[in-house]
Image (cartoon, rainbow, N blue to C red):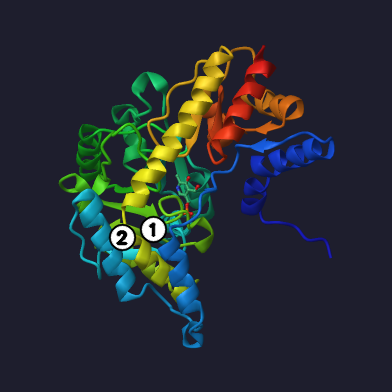
Amino acid sequence: MNMVASKKTERMATSIFTELADKKREAIKKGMDVIDLSVGSPDLPPPPHVVDTIVKYSKDTTKYGYTLKGIDEFNEAAAYFYKERYGIELNPEREVLQLMGSQDGLAHLATAMIDPGDYVLVPDPGYPIYEQGVMIAGGSIYPMPLLEENNFLPQLHEIPLEILHKTKMMIISYPGNPVTALANKEFFEEVVAFAKKYNILVVHDFAYSELIFDQNPQISFMSVQGAKEIGIEFNSLSKTFNMAGCRIGYAVGNEEALKILASFKSNIDYGIFYPIQMAAVSALTGDFSVLQKQVEEYEKRRDILISGLAKGGWQVANSPATMFVWAKIPSGWTSRQFAFELIEKTGVVVVPGDAFGKQGEGYVRMAIVQSPENLEKAAKGIAEFLQ
Ligand SMILES: Cc1ncc(COP(=O)(O)O)c(C=O)c1O
């Protein structure tokens, strides 16, 4: 039988990450010393108490059944974390929804909320699942360009009225991926007013809420007055507590929107393994000093990479947050030419910016998920390559 993928699958299939993995394999085959700065999977370990909790509960053979949904302790722990870290009061029962990673929510929210003909405003460049989620739902995309000259904030007044009248949802992320910029409270207030005016659900992806550097403020969208009336915020334990493989995250905020997503999800998944949920509880209610140490580690890595590149004559903008450096490439290259040639010549793997949208052309994304020594080596290799 000739197996044919659906049109939707085909549109998503050619991931740049597959292409990069092939090129990486070729470089390894040639005996090159490969340093992979492509995928944002944390290389640091989770806190020891998190691992201990998984071990403890994994030994309890009564905990291997379906959990169906988030246990109460998890919802309470997420509400506690939001209160402690961002000063936000949440009703654990109604304003917290557990997810199998924030990806789960981002992938399914559009299908739960959007019908064909509905528009979703997405950042360009943006994290790919924003657009793919809408595509799976059969909705339409309106890309909001994130340009350096606008501090990477979308210009809401430039969105045509005829689009706004068909728009049901908008996605933003500060700090985001690949664009690591931060937003200020005034921008979030503008978004709340805009969403109320046009009746739009705002989705704020706050996956990097705990990777904010140089003592910049950590502003949750939910801290803005009126945000709960029109918005939800995704958060995750993946980057904050290095639990990416555990697949656990959550959404907070507007209870009606969360109810719709929960109802959709109840048809397709049966909850997260109990020991993982308990591990998340121990992370969210545990010792927060680990978070500051982690910030310092990433700041150090960022500084090593950026100063190493500068030594080689490539001035790259400072990253105020996240585990990425969003770097404007020297003129004369396309993003793909630059990334592919860089692997071939140096073994350093970075992601071409156009993988995240049209406006990503001219940039590459580097994930600082390598040791300081490796980042120094990578910067040196890139600097030599450019010379
Ligand atoms: C901006 C952003 N949002 C969401 C996710 C998904 O994270 P998870 O599903 O592990 O919570 C990622 C992962 O890299 C991300 O970069």
Q: Are marks 1 and 2 in contact (CB under 8 Å)?
A: yes
Q: Is residue 353 above or below residue 313?
A: below
Nearer to me, 102 or 41: 41
Residue 334 visible in the snapshot: no
**Residue found at x 43% / y 58%:** 47
Check disc 2 and give the amino acid type.
Ala
Query: How many numbered dots are placed on residues in this image?
Result: 2
Is 198 displayed left or right of 125 in the figure? Answer: left
Query: Viewer-proximal residue, 166 or 257?
Result: 257
Q: Residue at x 19, y 53 (%)?
A: 88
Crowding at dot 2, Cα within 10 Å, few <14 / some 14-19 / many 20+, comes out as many
Is the residue indicated by label 1 positioned so its CB lies within 8 Å of ligand 1? no
Q: Residues within 10 Å of mark 1 (few under 14, many from 20)?
A: some
Element under label 1?
helix
Q: Amino acid at mark 1?
A: Met
Residue ranking furthest to the bottom:
62
Residue that numbered label 1 is attached to: 113
Q: For this rendering, which residue is in front, 9 or 206?
A: 206
Quadrant where the C terminus is found in the figure: top right
Horizontal relation, residue 131 to residue 171: left or right: right
Residue position for label 2: 257
Q: Quadrant of residue 361?
A: top right
